[in-house]
Image (cartoon, rainbow, N blue to C red):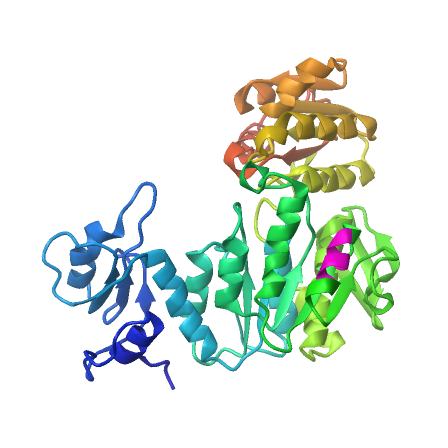
Amino acid sequence: MAFDWSDVSVRKALGMRTDLAQEELAYEGVSTDSRTISEGDLYVALVGERFDGHDFVADAFARGAVGAVVSRPAAGDPAGTLYPVDDTLDALGRLAAWRRQRIDVPVVAITGSSGKTTTKEMTRAALAETYRVHATPGNQNNRIGMPLTILSMPDDVEALVLELGTNQPGEIEALAQVARPDIAVITTVGKSHLEKLETFEGVLAEKLQILRGIAEGGRCVVGDDPPVLAERAHALCSSVQVVGWSQNADQDARPGNAEVDVFGRYSFEWRGQRVTAPTAGKHAASNALMALAVASLLNVPVRDAVRGLGSSKVGSLRGEFQRIGDLTVIVDCYNANPQSVRASLEVLESQAVTGDKVAVLGSMLELGSSATELHAEVLKDAVARDVDLIIATGHFAEVAAELGFSEERVVAGENWEEIYSVLVDRLNGGEIILLKASRGIALERMLTRLEEDFGREGSRKVGT
């Protein structure tokens, strides 16, 4: 039976009077995009920095909408039912919360400074052997994307997996109150989004808000690093499972007999089954452990969860290995913070190759007043590792100049084109190259050039 988005239910969700409701009026779904709206939908006119949905209310009605949620008079002459509210973004969350309260399926919500999207995809895959799963598409994890994930959930779904993101105080709290998860997951906490969260303590406090929104009888899964995460989680949640590799993890939530293949992928024993993480690095294996822990809490047989995990698709630019000519490239430039850059450097360092190990590092964004200090710390860490060449741009280039490293080890450039030229000049063949930066740097543009220059038959050879 389809979910009832009647005029009455919309008014109740938005806290409006129901005595004025039209009995015959009902909606097929909820949309925030007038360009893709479907016949019979309710349109929510969101307001952003560069757009105002109220300019498109008339267009939404012309395309098939029969109602609209608005916070000011709409442009044109809308031919449909209007629901006036103070804040349309808040109204979108209220509609999603109404839908969430009326579903009887397990809800998993995942947050963390690193690995939340990968863990979400692994969790989706681990559950899919037993449940029909609906999950956040891509990284649509903010106050628009997460409510829309709930609102777009098909009626036959048996498990809902949500990703919760933040870059300022209060976002996780708002999202958690909508999601009301039965299982809340915090992958890890590190120094990220400091521009508005300001300090590590600010990040930790923000991430822990997911536990305050947990449903009655809910359970928590948290990573073992940093140790303070588990300590604080135990103070907020009555049922906490700590997952990871250290002694801080629960004994039954640690892997056994770990091995690493030539691509840096970890395999390990988990409750009688052999597991291979889909992507390279110990951090990726930790994400896999969390997905398996969630599956166990939802009674998915271990063998089925492991089989499902093996089919997970973690998305592009997230630690994937690509072969271009005789070069190996680790493409890990979807996002970056100090914790994730160190994890990527660990993967690079662990590789057994005939050529040099090269780290191309671009800026870690949204670090606020701590940016210079944190870029310097990470660059020093990189230089101390078994990495032959570090090519730096952005904030890393700025601190490299101040720290005075030898150009034999650290070379800086102002932009990606400049550092690409530096990279090509230093290639001799057989190198493994890490591309790591925040999303806004778009370091994958170097990947395109590498493919053009070295990846096609008849293309130039390394060292020429």
- Most distant residue in the bottom direction: 1
Q: Is residue 148 left or right of residue 389?
A: left
Residue drawn at (46%, 77%) of the image? 101
Picture coordinates of residue 258, whole percent (x, y) = 87, 57
Residue drawn at (78%, 56%) of the image? 224
Residue drawn at (60%, 18%) of the image? 413
Picture coordinates of residue 202, whole percent (x, y) = 62, 45
Q: Which quadrant, please, contains the C terminus?
A: top right
Magenta part of the chain: 228-233
Above/below status of 59 relative to 7: above
Quarter holding residue 447: top right
Foreground pick, 53 / 127:
53
Q: Which quadrant, please, contains the N terminus?
A: bottom left
In magenta stretch: residue 232: yes
Residue drawn at (59%, 69%) of the image? 214
Q: Is residue 302 visible?
A: yes
Above/below status of 306 relative to 346: below
Quarter holding residue 72: bottom left
Picture coordinates of residue 78, whole percent (x, y) = 13, 60
In magenta stretch: residue 400: no
Foreground pick, 42 / 131:
42
Q: Is residue 17 left or right of residue 193?
A: left
Q: Is residue 326 visible?
A: no
Prevailing secondary structure of the magenta residues:
helix
Picture coordinates of residue 390, whole percent (x, y) = 71, 24
Q: Looking at the image, how many numbered discs can be counted on the residues?
A: 0
